[in-house]
Amino acid sequence: MNRIAHPKPLSADEILADTTNIIARYFPDARIFLFGSRAKGDARETSDFDIAVDAGSKISLGVIARIKNEIDELRTLKSIDIIDLNRVNPKFKTIIRKSGVNIYDRGNRTA
């Protein structure tokens, strides 16, 4: 009996790196933050990835959709949520900037 080899799912670090690379292709000068349970260090194996992007101005919904489509192609069953920091409530934006982990800052990986 032949077994079909399935590609190994990405690790959390690989998911984060690949997601950052996808976003950075669209917005090389953006700031990208990880927030939520993964940023706090209390994530479970099944926890999602919460990513916030500050591209300097609002990102068009079409571009957000393209980014999400590319991210959906990653080898993972984990949910990866992307938000545009310039489309959220200012208080929420402040919370993410203070408590989130800056993982990419204008062309430089920071995490």
Image: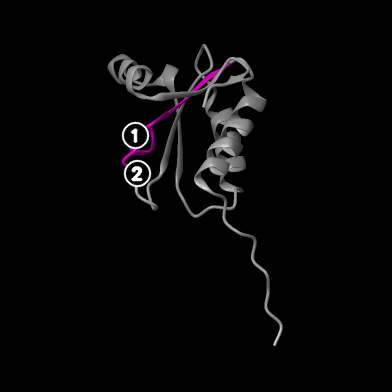
Q: Are marks 1 and 2 in contact (CB under 8 Å)?
A: yes
Looking at the image, residue 77 lies above or below residue 82: below
In the rendered structure, which disc, 1 or 2, sits on the residue that comes first in sequence?
Answer: 1
Numbered label attached to residue 36: 1
Badge 1 crowding class, 10 Å Cα cut-off, few under 14, some 14 to 19, many 20 or more, is: some
| Amino acid at dot 1 | Gly
Q: Nearer the viewer, mark 1 or mark 2?
A: 2
Q: Residue furthest right?
A: 2
In the rendering, at what x and y percent does residue 25 appear? Answer: 67, 27
In the rendering, at what x and y percent does residue 27 appear? Answer: 62, 21
Which of the pair 59/80 is nearer the observer? 80
Q: CA distance from mark 1 to mark 2?
A: 8 Å
Looking at the image, residue 10 lies above or below residue 86: below
Would residue 89 be counted in the magenta stretch?
Answer: no
**Magenta region, residue range:** 30-42
Callout 2: helix, strand or loop? loop
Numbered label attached to residue 43: 2
Q: Residue furthest top?
A: 56
Q: Residue at x 59, y 14 (%)?
A: 106
Which of the pair 65/18 is nearer the observer? 18
